[in-house]
Amino acid sequence: EIVLTQSPATLSLSPGERATLSCRASQSVGSSLGWYQQKPGQAPRLLIYDVSNRASGIPARFSGSGSGTDFTLTISSLEPEDFVLYYCQHQSNWRLSFGGGTKVDIK
Amino acid sequence: QVQLVESGGGVVQPGGSLRLSCAASGFTFSNYGMHWVRQAPGKGLEWMAVISFEGKSQYYADSMKGRFTISRDNSRNTLYLQMNSLRTEDTAMYYCAKERNVKATPGWYFDLWGRGTLVTVSS
């Protein structure tokens, strides 16, 4: 089973700053990597699929990159509503795993 | 309106059973694989199981095998999760989620989630 490790656990930034969230896989995952955003009391929302493709309706300030075992979600300029939780996700061999999450909070 | 609505959660004693339902509307349910994902209070997301669009294939996380069964009724646009021998550590919000890709197209990304149904296992 592939283990996804997200870092940092908490990222403290100010509105307007750039956020860089990391997701590292225990082995290569090819292009099968997605990102979700979860606001308090809500279900997750798909942001990015296949490493770098934005899901429908997702603002352009969200972007994904990476390859092999190291992946990044970048929020180019933080809006107030972006200070929430983010999870990475991978699927292979009929199994799916989520990372432990990164919380982006206001500095 | 495109949505998923879970139901069937509640308080159950250890060792008990529950069946969760997920009613789909606003899209062609029978074209999409469906999943269950749970989240314990204050914890991260945990994938549980998937069922293929036509219901012929099911796969489970290793930790879910034996006590949980995923099924679907495409005529009723409904997904199910039968949960048996429940433990206190099964206390969580249970979400159903729809795959983004139609039918057997590879890639398990979830573009539609329900609001969840809370299961509390306690004596």
Image (cartoon, coloured by chain):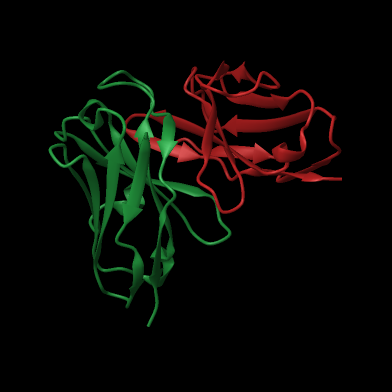
- Colour of chain B as rendered: green
Compared across the picture, whether A11 is left or right of A44 comes to right
- Measured as percent of width and height from the top left, residue A52 is found at 58, 17
- Closer to the camera in the image, A91 or A2: A91
Image vertical order of residue A60 relative to residue B114, above or below: above
Compared across the picture, whether A55 is left or right of B74 comes to right
Q: Residue at x 18, y 34 (%)?
A: B57
Q: Residue at x 39, y 25 (%)?
A: B100
- Measured as percent of width and height from the top left, residue B103 is found at 25, 22
- Closer to the camera in the image, A91 or B93: B93
Asked if one can make out residue A1 in the rendered structure from this viewpoint, the answer is: no
- Measured as percent of width and height from the top left, residue A92 is found at 38, 28
Q: How many marks?
A: 0
Q: Residue furthest front?
A: B1
- Colour of chain A as rendered: red
Q: Residue at x 42, y 66 (%)?
A: B91
- Closer to the camera in the image, B91 or B22: B22
Q: Quadrant of residue B109?
A: top left
Compared across the picture, whether B113 is left or right of A89 comes to left
Asked if one can make out residue B116 in the rendered structure from this viewpoint, the answer is: yes
Point out the image quarter for the C terminus of chain A: top right
Q: Residue at x 59, y 24 (%)?
A: A58
Compared across the picture, whether B43 is left or right of B58 comes to right
Q: Quadrant of residue B75?
A: top left
Point out the image quarter for the N terminus of chain A: top left
Image vertical order of residue B7 relative to residue B35, above or below: below
